[in-house]
Image: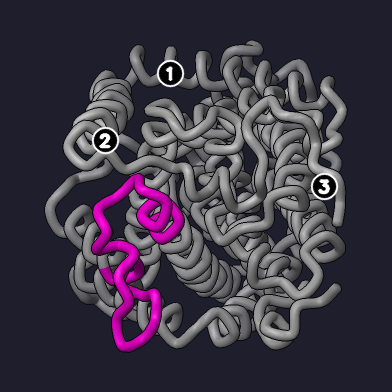
């Protein structure tokens, strides 16, 4: 039965926009050059592997989202799977901090592109985009969805122009760059897949909007599967177009500008500017979608005992204080901390989070009705990619590995100290559905 209160909230198009907007951001514009440096001419293969993992995760999240629709999304899923103990609280705090770092990465990428048009300090641009989308999210999910839909349509249109132009300009000689004989070893391809995973994890934010959907059982699967499918196709076509239009030696080291540079052979300087505009739209919409999702995560953790009650306090009659606190934390990171050393931290963090969600899902699979093999496959692939990526971080950027370990350890430490000091738990989440982890499935009313 449709809830009348949800009539004008998040619809299918807006939910698709949230997922696509969160995925098609830093994933394709900021890390493409890094992935090309690792995977070389097999860069499209790395995107395919990342897409397969995202597809497995989508299956798990759809089953969980339909069973436990909530603004908390994966927060609720972890608590449902592991109960209300320290493990749930620690992983949820780790997830929250991972989202904050991801927003900072998106804002920083936006600033890099914006500075090519109007020469202002990068930090000014980064602060500005965070404040702008904080205001949009403050106006409500309905307006947020409309803004996201418009941005996603524009940036996807620009990317389609690039894809068409790149494939029209490609020659037989260019296609030879994709030959398997030029691929690096499996370690390079898998490391590239690990790095690019941050470009796929955004679909999980759709589950945060499930509680605001009129028909979550119908709209949630369509939104998640649809957004993942759209992004896989876009990523594979774009990465193939880049590899065939730019010599591999030139691709390595291009970083943020790899996609824009790849547009020059077929579209000239106009193409470079067009892709730069698409990058601005993509990174801006990723800030928008991720800020919306992480705010809901903070709200759900606070509401059920995992963060100080300030995150859950009503301001002007609305539950928006978590939005302001989250935005403030993002701004602190933007202004104070250099994040170049933790470029891989976002992907590694979310690989751990998705593995934790899936392990918890296996414990309550009788409630969701999900098949075991896709969930088990997700656990194995997430942990395998994490191991490969972490090995690369230790080898090439030890500070990134240290930062990841400190964040994870701090999440457990803060959770343990806060629980002992306050005695608060996640029992409210368990009472919301009447389930306990491992209990029998509830009969539908």
x, y percentage for residue 406?
Answer: 24, 26
Image depth: mark 1 or mark 3 in front: 1
Rendered image quadrant of residue 370: top right
Image depth: mark 2 or mark 3 in front: 2
Task: Give the residue drawn at x 39%, y 36%.
Answer: 89
108 or 244: nearer the viewer: 108
x, y percentage for residue 146?
Answer: 62, 85
Q: Which mark is residue 36?
A: none
Q: Secondary structure at mark 2?
A: helix
Q: Give the Cα separation between the discs numbered 1 and 3.
A: 38 Å
Task: Give the residue drawn at x 35%, y 52%.
Answer: 100
Q: Secondary structure at mark 1?
A: helix
**Residue bounds of the magenta highlight:** 298-324
Along the polypeptide, which appears first: circle 2 or circle 1?
1
Image depth: mark 2 or mark 1 in front: 2
429 or 265: nearer the viewer: 429
Q: Which residue carries the number 1 mark?
A: 390
Q: Is residue 326 above or below residue 388?
A: below
Task: Give the residue drawn at x 68%, y 25%.
Answer: 438
Do residues under tags 2 and 1 come within 8 Å of each other at their CB atoms?
A: no
Q: Which residue carries the number 3 mark?
A: 171
Rendered image quadrant of residue 174: top right
x, y percentage for residue 151?
Answer: 59, 78
Q: Which residue carries the number 2 mark?
A: 419
Dot 1 surroundings within 10 Å: few (below 14), some, or many (20 or more)?
A: many
């Amino acid at each position: 039965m449709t809830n009348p209160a949800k009539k004008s909230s998040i619809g299918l198009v807006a939910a698709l926009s949230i997922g696509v907007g969160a995925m098609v951001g830093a994933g394709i514009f900021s890390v493409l050059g890094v992935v090309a440096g690792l995977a070389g001419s097999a860069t499209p293969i790395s995107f395919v592997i990342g897409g397969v993992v995202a597809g497995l995760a989508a299956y798990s999240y759809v089953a969980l989202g339909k069973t436990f629709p909530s603004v908390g999304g994966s927060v609720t899923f972890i608590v449902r799977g592991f109960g209300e103990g320290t493990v749930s609280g620690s992983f949820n705090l780790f997830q929250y901090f991972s989202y904050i770092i991801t927003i900072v990465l998106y804002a920083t990428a936006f600033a890099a592109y914006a500075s090519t048009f109007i020469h202002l300090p990068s930090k000014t641009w980064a602060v500005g985009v965070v404040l702008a989308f904080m205001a949009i999210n403050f106006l409500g999910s309905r307006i947020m969805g409309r803004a996201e839909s418009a941005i996603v349509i524009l940036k996807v249109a620009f990317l389609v122009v690039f894809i068409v132009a790149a494939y029209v300009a490609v020659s037989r000689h260019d296609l030879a760059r994709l030959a398997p004989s030029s691929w690096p070893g499996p370690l390079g391809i898998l490391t590239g897949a690990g790095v690019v995973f941050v470009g796929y994890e955004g679909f999980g934010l759709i589950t945060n909007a499930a509680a605001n959907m009129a028909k979550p059982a119908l709209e949630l699967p369509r939104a998640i599967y649809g957004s993942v499918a759209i992004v896989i196709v876009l990523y594979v076509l774009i990465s193939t177009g880049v590899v065939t239009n730019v010599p591999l030696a030139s691709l390595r080291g291009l970083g943020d500008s790899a996609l824009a540079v790849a547009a020059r052979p077929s579209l000239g300087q106009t193409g470079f500017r067009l892709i730069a505009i698409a990058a601005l739209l993509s990174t801006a919409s990723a800030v928008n979608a991720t800020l919306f999702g992480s705010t809901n995560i903070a709200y759900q953790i606070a509401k059920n005992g995992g963060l100080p009650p300030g995150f859950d306090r009503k301001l002007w009659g609305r539950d928006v204080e978590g939005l302001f606190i989250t935005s403030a934390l993002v701004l602190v990171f933007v202004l104070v901390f250099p994040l170049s050393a933790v470029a891989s931290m976002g992907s590694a963090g979310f690989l751990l989070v998705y593995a934790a969600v899936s392990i918890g899902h296996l414990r309550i699979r009788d409630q969701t009705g999900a098949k075991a093999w896709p969930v088990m496959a997700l656990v194995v692939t997430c942990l395998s990619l994490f191991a490969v990526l972490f090995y690369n971080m230790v080898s090439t950027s030890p500070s990134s590995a240290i930062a990841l370990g400190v964040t994870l350890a701090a999440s457990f430490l803060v959770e343990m100290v806060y629980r002992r000091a306050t005695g608060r738990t996640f029992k409210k989440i368990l009472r919301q559905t009447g389930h306990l982890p491992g209990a029998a499935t509830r009969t539908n009313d």
